Amino acid sequence: EKKYDYLIVGAGLFGSVFAHEMTKRNKKCLVIDKRNHLGGNVYCEEKEGINVHKYGAHIFHTNDKKIWDYVNQFATFNNYINSPLSLSKGNLYNLPFNMNTFYQLWGTKTPEEAKQKINEQIAKYGVKSPNNLEEQALSLVGKDIYETFIKEYTEKQWGKKATELPAFIIKRLPVRFTYNNNYFNDIYQGIPIGGYNVIIDGLLKGIETKTSIDFFEDRQHLESLANKIVYTGKIDEFFGYKFGQLEYRSLRFENEVHDIENYQGNAVVNYNDAQYSYTRIIEHKHFEFGKQEKTIITREYPENWDRGKEAYYPINNDDNQKVFKQYKEESLKSKNVIFGGRLAEYRYYDMHQIIASSLAKVEEISKRKQE
Ligand code: FDA
C-alpha cells in the first residue's frame, strides 16, 4: 500500500483543481512544485499592498456558467473589465479594434464610414493567398490597422519580421462596429478579490503540499510514494527529451515601484512601436481598483527561450507539432501517469479552459473506476 493515491507534480490550476476534486472523492494527494510557491502561473506576489501578477497579467473570463460557478466557490470576483490601450507613434488608441479605435485612427464616426474605410484598405492592400503574417494581416484589416497596431508589436513578440512569420499565427482579426472597449466577448469576467492566491488556497485547503521540490531531482523516491502520478510539467522533460526539445517563447518581467498613486490610469497599455523593446506595461493595482499610495508597474519583454527560462508560449509550427506527437504517443503508454495542463499538452490554454480540462480528467477517471 502506497502512502498516496496521487502524486501531483505542479501546483498550477490543473494540479490544484485535480487535487481538490480527488480529495473530495476521498483520495489521498500530495502536491509538489519546483517553484517556492503554489499556484503556478496565476500566482500573485504581494508588494506595497498590491497583488503583483508575477507571471504576466491574468484576467479571468469565460462563457461557461459551470466554470464560473466553480471558481466562485473559492473567491468573489470584482467587476474588472479588460480594456487595454495601445500607444502607437505618440498616440493612444482603444483596443480591441472598435469604433473608438477607428475614430482615433481615421475620424470616422459611424459604422458605415468605418466599414467603408476598412473595405477600401483591404481591397487596396490585401492579397488572394497570403504567404506570411504581413500579407495575412493586410488582407484581413488593411494597411492602417496593420501598421499602427500589428506589425511592430508582433515582430517584438516573435523576434522575427512579419514577412518571415507564417500567416497562420493570425487566423482572424476581429473588428467591432460598436463603441465597446471590452476586450473579451465572454459573459463572465473579473479578478478574484484578494488575488488568485485566494482561489489556489481554497483549492488546496487541507491538502498536503511541498514547494521547492523538483520532480526530476528525486524522481524514483517520489514515484514510489503514490499509486498514480499527475504530471503538469513539460512533456519533453518527462521523457528525457528523447525525441528532441519542444520550443517556446519566453518573457522577461521588469517591475518598478513608483512613489505615485497612479502611473498610467489603466491596467494594460500596449507599446506598439519598435523603439520600445517591451510590448506592454501592466499597472497591477488597477486590476483591483487599488487605492494604495504607491503603484507597481511591470514592463513585459518578449524573449527567446532556453531551458533556463520560463516556458510561456508554445511555438506551434509543424516541426514542434511533429515532436509533440511522438511524446503524446509515448505518454499514452504510461498507464500510471496522467498528463495535463499547458506544459504537458504543449498548448496555450486560458485559465477557464485549464479548469475545465482538469475537471473533465477527474470525471473520466471516476467514471472508469465505477465500471
Ligand atoms: P502552470 O504553469 O500554472 O503550472 C504548472 C506547474 O508545474 C508550475 O508551477 C511549475 O513550476 C510546475 N512544475 C513544472 N515542472 C515541474 C517539476 N519538474 N517538478 C515540480 N514542479 C514542476 N489565462 C487567462 O484565462 N487569462 C489571462 O489573462 C491569462 N494571461 C496569461 C498571461 C501570460 C503571460 C501567460 C503565459 C498565460 C496567461 N494565461 C491567462 C494562461 C494561464 O496562465 C494558464 O491557463 C494556467 O496558468 C495554466 O495552468 P497549468 O496548471 O496548466 O500550468
Image (spheres, helix red, strand yellow):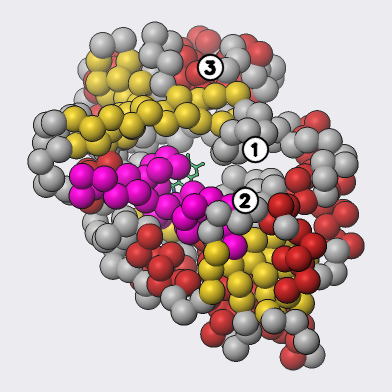
Where residue 155 appears, as percent x and y from the top left, is: 53, 17
Q: Are marks 1 and 3 in contact (CB under 8 Å)?
A: no
Q: Left or right of 72: which side holds 341?
A: right
**Which residue is rendered at x = 73% and y = 74% of the image?**
225
Compare marks 2 and 3 and give the one earlier in the sequence. Answer: 3
* Viewport quadrant of the C terminus: bottom right
Compare marks 1 and 3 and give the one earlier in the sequence. Answer: 3
Q: Left or right of 132: which side holds 208?
A: left
| Label 3 beta carbon less than 8 Å to ligand 1 | no
Provide the residue designation for mark 3.
155
Between 7 and 274, the one nearer to me in the picture: 7
User: Mark 2 or 3, which is nearer the eye?
Assistant: 2
Provide the residue designation for mark 2.
342
**Which residue is rendered at x = 50% and y = 9% of the image?**
124
Between 199 and 37, the one nearer to me in the picture: 37
In this rendering, does residue 359 appear at all? no
Q: Amino acid at mark 3?
A: Glu
Where residue 4 appears, as percent x and y from the top left, is: 68, 79
Residue 96 against residue 69 in the figure, above or below? above
Q: Amino acid at mark 1?
A: Pro
- Element carrying mark 1: strand
| Label 1 beta carbon less than 8 Å to ligand 1 | no
Q: What are the residue bounds of the magenta stretch?
A: 32-61
Q: Left or right of 340: which side holds 125?
A: left
**Which residue is rendered at x = 55% and y = 64% of the image?**
210
- Element carrying mark 2: loop
Q: Are marks 1 and 2 in contact (CB under 8 Å)?
A: yes
Where residue 344 appears, as percent x and y from the top left, is: 70, 52
**Which residue is rendered at x = 79% and y = 62% of the image?**
220
Q: Amino acid at mark 2?
A: Arg
Provide the residue designation for mark 1.
314
